[in-house]
Image (cartoon, rainbow, N blue to C red):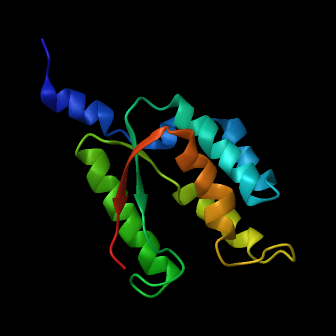
Amino acid sequence: MYNQASNSKKRGEHMQKYFTEKDLHGLTLAGNFRDLSKIALEIIKRMPQPVVQVCGPMTTGGKGTLEENLAVFGETIKMLAERGEYVFNQMPFESPMQRMKTEDWYKGGSQILDDFYLPIFESGFIKTLYFIEG
């Protein structure tokens, strides 16, 4: 018998369970945003479909600070997961991204969007994007 409540809970489990030790180690070794994107795609491929993602301002706009914006992302991801969505949580990638932004090769502008997010979106594995205002 189909149990909607238990199915919703199963679907809403936090996506960190899809990370492997290799993925977590890779986050510390990644040398650029494309390396991070490859790790993200491997994680997303392990997730049941349909996969959704939260989008919006992290370092600019939004609530005004990275910390406050990350809190909004976290709350939104949690709410969607509790609702039963399979949410790709990009928050574990934020720390390596912030580290990379201090490197000489970082150009700013749309580099993170082009090198990290674009390959993910072009993969077709993300079926729905939920946008946070800001």
Picture residue at 60% right of the left edge, 54% below the top: 118
Q: Is residue 93 left or right of residue 77?
A: right
Residue pushed farthest right?
Answer: 104
Picture residue at 40% right of the left edge, 31% below the top: 49
34 above or below 43? below
Pick the front one: 44 or 8: 44
119 above or below 6? below
112 above or below 36? below
Residue 95 visible from this viewpoint: no
Res 110 quadrant in image: bottom right
Give x and y (percent) for residue 76. Answer: 32, 61
Res 50 quadrant in image: top left
| Quadrant placement of the C terminus | bottom left
Picture residue at 56% right of the left edge, 45% below the top: 122
Residue pushed farthest top?
Answer: 1
Q: Is residue 123 left or right of residue 5?
A: right
Residue 74 visible from this viewpoint: yes
Q: Is residue 15 left or right of residue 37?
A: left
Res 68 quadrant in image: bottom left
Give x and y (percent) for residue 75. Answer: 33, 63
Q: Count of labels shown?
A: 0
Residue pushed farthest front?
Answer: 122
Give x and y (percent) for residue 119. Answer: 63, 49
Picture residue at 68% right of the left edge, 72% below the top: 98
| Quadrant placement of the N terminus | top left
